[in-house]
Image: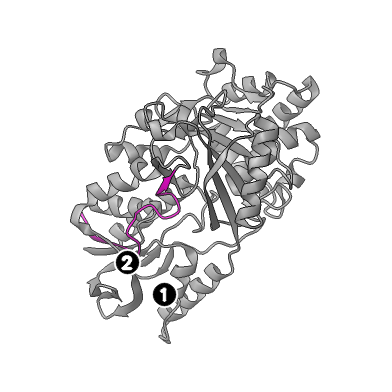
Amino acid sequence: MRLAVVGAGWAGLAAAVEAVDAGADVTLFEATRTPGGRARALPAVRPDGAPLLLDNGQHILIGAYRETLALMQRLDVAPEAALLGTPLSLPYPDGSGLQTPAWAARWPAPLDAVAAILTAKGWRWRERLALVGASLGWQRSGFACASTLTVAELCKTLPAKVMDELIEPLCVSALNLTASQASAQVFLTVMRDALFGQGFGAWSASALLLPREDLGALLPEAACRHLGARVHLGTRITDLRQEAAGWSLSGDGGSVHADRVIWATAASPAAAVVGATDEVSANGAARRHWASMARRLDFTAITTVYAWAPGARLSVPMVALRCSPEAPAQFVFDRGALRPDDASAQGVLAFVISASEGERETLQAQVLAQAASQLGLPNLQPIQTVVEKRATFACTPGLLRPPAAIAPGLWVAGDYIDGPYPATLEGAVRSGQAAARLACAA
């Protein structure tokens, strides 16, 4: 069975690896020269002239990302070496915030998270107990709620401090939307898996996993090595036609034939090619309908501001920040602490603005001012500010996401495809693997 996979983001790579390992004859096409999609390495230069590798956005994984971590392991990338695992911790610069105590770090879920909540610094007992009570209530309900609810509506009885210091940061980091906009049902699914689910290896489900390597080394490069000559970078597919037996794909490298196709690009280019058909058949109508669903998706941006100063360090590798319209970053990462043996990473900080709005230069200036006021670092110099304008689909209440199956022999993979998770690496990997299994079983 000849299978064409279009797109070498994390969904496409996961699909191709899954299909190859199942015995399929796979060809993977990627329009750019760099695999990884919206989670890839990015060359840069520090203000002092030192070259370094950044990422097109600072990412974080959690212990509940079981399929992603298992795929890394299958590709001979040891998760324990590539990722720094820490118990659930969202400390602010003043030491307040949620932090799992050392004595509870190896407790099974959800006891580790409960311990973190009950010992949260700067919280009153009524605030701690309100969150524990809400979490147990979500568990009793099977982590289900009305599809029309927002996170803010779901959590309307929680104290303001809990909302400001935990729910809002978790919501905006996981769903890339504010609590007043985000789907409560998807948020509950994330909470179920992160706080009450099963982790990977020695990591609990809620463990924070911070990349020690650039995102290219974390999975895309290993997947390409595994696939070998099946990967065709710099090859854009611009036309997809159904034939009597299979599919014809054409683009930069001419035309090829495949028995089955998995389209694994972002939603907009997927809609442009998948929907470009004048067939009057049921399959043609299904392609146009799928494309119309994909076009109706809204998207939100993530901005990462990379900055540097000699000797700049944080007390821990990741710190939560007080966020406001004038101070937009929610988190900051110390890349030097994550990579102590990498001289180019020393003094490099990554500030993340989820659900970002505004111009690049304005956001960068605001973040540098935020670093000075909240971290006491007035001398940071910008390295690069990366704005992913369509970083994630807007995971709003009642959203109808396009399905994986379009027509016989044609599937789509991506973090925006219908499923229980928001736009995350785990969602992309699971979508790719599911599409590959369907294609191989058809």
**Residue 5's spot in the image, x, y percent?**
31, 62
* Amino acid, disc 2: Val
**Residue beneath disc 2:** 261
Which residue lies most toward the top here? 103
Q: Is residue 3 above or below residue 166?
A: below
Report which quarter residue 4 is drawn in.
bottom left
Left/right of residue 130 with respect to residue 234 in the rendered view: right
**Residue 73's spot in the image, x, y percent?**
31, 36
Q: Label 2 neighbourhood size at 10 Å, few (<14), some (14-19), many (20+)?
A: many
Q: Residue at x 72, y 29 (%)?
A: 131
**Mark 2 against mark 1, which lies toward the viewer?**
1
Q: Residue at x 21, y 58 (%)?
A: 230
Q: CA distance from mark 2 to mark 1?
A: 13 Å
Q: Which residues are magenta?
A: 23-45
Please tell me which residue lies in front, 414 or 36.
36
**Residue beneath disc 1:** 273
SS label for mark 2? strand
Left/right of residue 412 with respect to residue 399 in the rendered view: left
**Residue 238's spot in the image, x, y percent?**
36, 75
Q: Is residue 38 magenta?
A: yes
